C-alpha cells in the first residue's frame, strides 16, 4: 500500500511537469477553447434553438475536446525530445507515469470545460441539479483523459503530429455519434447502437437529463457507464503502453 | 569484496537477432567497471536490462541485492543513470530538471535543494541554474544529465557513453567526477567505446562484441594477454632495411617510418639484442629504444576480430 502511495506521489510530479511543459502554452489553451467553440458555432448558426437546448452538447464537446487535446501527443513528444528514457530510469512505474499524464489532461479538461458550466449560472439557465452535473463533468473529464492516454499508446510514434492526426480520426466520429448534435432518441436504431459504445454519449445524455430533463438512458446508467469506460481505458492504456514502450525507446536510437 | 552487480546468462533477442547472448559477469562494490565494445555490440541493451527498462528473455541479474525483473523499482531507487540517448527537459531550467528528478526519487525538498546546489556548483552550472536548458551547449547538457543521475546519491551509477561528443574541458570534468564518486565508494558501470576513457578510469574492463563477452580483465591484464602485440621501437641514426628484421622468426610484423622501426614481437628481449647487434655490425647508432605494451585499442581490435573469426 505504501508503495502505491509513493507511486501516486510521483504521478503528481509527472502531472506538474506536464502542465508546465505541455499545457501552459498560449496556443494550447487557445486551441482548447477555440476548437469546441467554432465547431459548436458551425452547428448552431441558422438553427432556432435556445441556449438551454444547446448547453448539453456544448459542455459535452468542450470537456471531450479539451481533456483529449494534448494527452495523445505527450508520449511522442517525450520520445522525440529524448526525455522518455531518462524518465524510465527513475523509480516510477509505467502506470504511475500514465496516471500523471492522465491527471494533467484531467485538470486541463476540467479547467476549460467548467467555463460553459459556470456561464449557465451567469446566464441564469435553470439546471435541475448543478452539483450533480459538476460531478458528472468531473467523471467525464477523467474518462476522456484516460482515453487520451490510450490514444497516445499506438502506434508508438515519435512524431506528435501523427498521434494528433490519428486521435482526431477517432475523436471526430465520436462527436457525431454521441448525441452532441443529435439527441440519442432522434437517431436511427443503428446509430443508437453505435452511440452506446461511446463514453461521450453517456455524458451528453446525463447533461440532457440535468439541464433539459430529457435523457435517453436512466441517469444512474449514465453515471455508471463513465467510470466503467474509465477503468477500461486505463487498463488498456497501461497494457498497450507497456507493450509499445520498447518500440518507442528503439525509435530514440 | 561484495558484489554490486551479478549478471548470469543474460540474454535478449530482437526478433531473430540475438542482441545479448548469455553474458555473465560480476561487478564488485566500489569498482569502475568498463563495458567496452563497438557500436551495436549490445552495450546499451545490457544496460537497459540492468536498469529494468528492458526485460531479459533469459538469464537473471541482481543489482545492489535486488533482482532486475522481480524488484525493478528497488533497483532503480538505488541507481543513477545517464542513458546513452537521453536529454534533460529543454523547456525547464537546470534547477527545475534537478527538482523534478529529485521528486521522482522521493527526496525531501530540503535535501533536494541542498544536493542540487552542491551538484550544480561542482559541475560549473550553478550560475546558469535558472536558464532554460534549450540554450545549453552539449557539454552543459551532459553535465546536467550527470547531475540528474547523482541527485539521489545512488550506490551504483550507470553511465552509457557519458562523454561521447563532448569537448575536452567537459570530458575532463566528467572524468574527474567519476573518479571522485568512485573514491567516495560508488560503483560505476561505464559503457564506452573510447579506449582512452576506459584505460584512464576503469579498474576492470569487459569487452563485448556481437552480444558476447570476449574478455574481462584489468586494462593491464588485457594488454598483457596479447603478448604478440608487444613492440620494440628503435630509432637509428640512418634508415635501415626492414627485410633483415623479418628474417627473424620471433618478429611477427615490422613497420618502418624513416629512421624509426617498430618491431612487433612476443619476445622483446631477443629483438633488443638483435637490434643492438644489427647496429654494431653496420656501424649504426641507436638514438632511442623503447619497449611498448600493446595499447588497449590494439588489444580491443584483436579481441573483436578474433571474436568475428577474422585473422589478426
Image: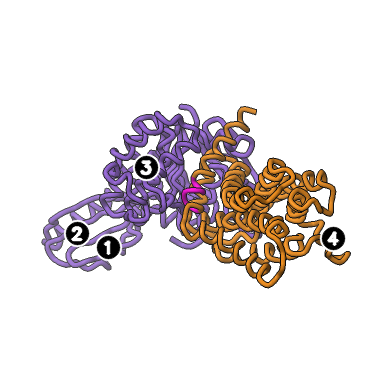
Q: Residue B84: give its label.
A: none
Residue B109, position as x, y percentages in the image: 43, 31
Magenta span covers which residues? A17-22
Q: Residue B245: give its label.
A: 1
Q: Is residue B265 visible?
A: no
Q: Distance between the residues labelled 4 and 1?
A: 100 Å
Compared to B116, does A117 lie above or below? below
Q: Can residue B135 be seen in this view?
A: yes
Q: Residue B95: give its label.
A: 3
Subunit under mark 1: B
Report the mark closest to the observer, 3 or 4: 4
Residue annotated with mark 2: B278
Residue A168, position as x, y percentages in the image: 64, 65
Subunit under mark 4: A
Q: Distance between the residues labelled 3 and 4?
A: 56 Å
Q: What color is chain B drawn in?
A: purple
Report the mark closest to the observer, 4 or 1: 4
Subunit under mark 3: B
Amino acid at each position: 500500500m505504501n508503495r502505491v502511495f509513493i507511486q501516486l506521489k510521483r504521478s503528481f510530479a509527472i502531472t506538474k511537469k506536464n502542465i508546465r511543459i505541455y499545457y501552459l502554452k498560449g496556443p494550447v489553451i487557445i486551441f482548447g477553447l477555440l476548437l469546441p467553440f467554432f465547431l459548436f458555432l458551425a452547428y448552431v448558426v441558422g438553427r432556432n434553438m435556445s441556449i438551454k437546448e444547446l448547453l448539453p452538447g456544448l459542455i459535452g464537446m468542450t470537456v471531450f475536446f479539451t481533456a483529449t487535446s494534448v494527452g495523445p501527443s505527450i508520449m511522442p513528444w517525450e520520445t522525440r525530445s529524448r526525455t522518455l528514457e531518462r524518465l524510465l530510469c527513475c523509480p516510477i512505474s509505467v502506470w504511475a507515469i500514465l496516471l500523471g499524464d492522465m491527471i494533467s489532461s484531467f485538470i486541463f479538461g476540467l479547467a476549460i470545460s467548467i467555463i460553459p458550466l459556470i456561464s449557465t449560472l451567469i446566464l441564469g439557465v435553470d439546471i435541475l441539479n448543478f452539483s450533480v452535473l459538476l460531478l458528472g463533468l468531473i467523471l467525464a473529464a477523467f474518462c476522456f483523459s484516460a482515453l487520451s492516454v490510450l490514444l497516445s499508446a499506438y502506434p508508438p510514434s515519435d512524431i506528435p503530429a501523427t498521434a494528433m492526426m490519428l486521435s482526431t480520426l477517432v475523436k471526430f466520429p465520436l462527436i457525431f455519434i454521441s448525441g452532441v448534435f443529435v439527441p440519442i432518441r432522434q437517431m436511427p436504431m443503428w446509430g443508437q447502437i453505435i452511440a452506446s459504445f461511446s463514453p461521450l454519449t453517456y455524458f451528453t445524455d446525463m447533461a440532457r437529463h440535468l439541464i433539459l430533463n430529457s435523457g435517453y438512458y436512466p441517469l444512474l446508467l449514465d453515471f455508471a457507464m463513465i467510470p466503467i469506460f474509465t477503468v477500461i481505458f486505463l487498463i488498456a492504456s497501461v497494457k498497450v503502453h507497456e507493450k509499445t514502450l520498447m518500440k518507442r525507446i528503439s525509435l530514440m536510437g | 569484496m561484495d558484489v554490486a552487480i551479478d549478471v548470469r546468462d543474460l540474454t535478449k533477442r530482437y526478433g531473430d537477432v540475438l542482441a545479448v547472448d548469455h553474458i555473465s559477469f560480476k561487478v564488485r562494490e566500489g569498482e569502475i567497471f568498463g563495458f567496452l565494445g563497438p557500436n551495436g555490440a549490445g552495450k546499451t541493451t545490457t544496460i537497459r536490462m540492468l536498469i529494468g527498462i528492458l526485460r531479459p528473455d533469459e538469464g537473471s541479474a541482481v543489482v545492489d541485492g535486488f533482482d532486475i525483473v522481480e524488484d525493478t523499482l528497488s533497483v532503480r531507487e538505488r541507481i543513477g543513470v545517464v542513458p546513452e540517448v537521453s536529454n534533460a527537459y529543454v523547456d525547464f531550467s537546470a534547477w527545475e530538471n534537478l527538482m523534478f528528478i529529485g521528486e521522482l526519487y522521493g527526496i525531501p525538498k530540503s535535501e533536494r535543494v541542498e544536493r542540487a546546489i552542491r551538484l550544480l556548483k561542482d559541475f560549473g552550472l550553478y550560475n546558469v541554474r535558472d536558464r532554460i536548458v534549450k540554450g545549453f551547449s552539449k557539454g552543459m547538457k551532459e553535465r546536467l544529465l550527470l547531475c540528474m543521475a547523482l541527485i539521489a546519491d545512488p550506490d551504483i551509477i550507470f553511465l552509457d557513453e557519458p562523454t561521447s561528443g563532448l569537448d575536452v574541458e567537459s570530458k575532463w570534468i566528467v572524468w574527474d567526477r567519476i573518479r571522485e564518486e568512485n573514491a567516495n565508494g560508488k560503483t560505476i558501470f561505464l559503457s564506452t567505446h573510447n579506449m582512452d576513457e576506459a584505460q584512464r578510469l576503469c579498474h576492470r574492463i569487459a569487452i563485448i562484441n556481437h552480444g558476447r563477452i570476449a574478455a574481462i580483465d584489468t586494462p593491464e591484464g588485457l594488454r598483457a594477454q596479447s603478448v604478440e602485440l608487444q613492440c620494440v621501437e628503435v630509432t637509428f641514426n640512418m634508415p635501415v632495411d626492414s627485410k633483415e628484421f623479418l628474417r627473424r622468426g620471433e618478429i611477427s610484423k615490422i613497420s618502418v617510418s624513416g629512421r624509426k622501426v617498430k618491431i612487433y614481437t612476443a619476445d622483446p628481449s631477443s629483438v633488443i639484442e638483435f637490434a643492438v647487434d644489427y647496429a654494431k655490425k653496420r656501424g649504426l647508432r641507436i638514438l632511442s629504444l623503447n619497449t611498448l605494451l600493446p595499447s588497449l585499442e590494439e588489444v580491443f581490435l584483436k579481441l573483436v576480430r578474433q571474436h568475428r573469426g577474422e585473422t589478426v
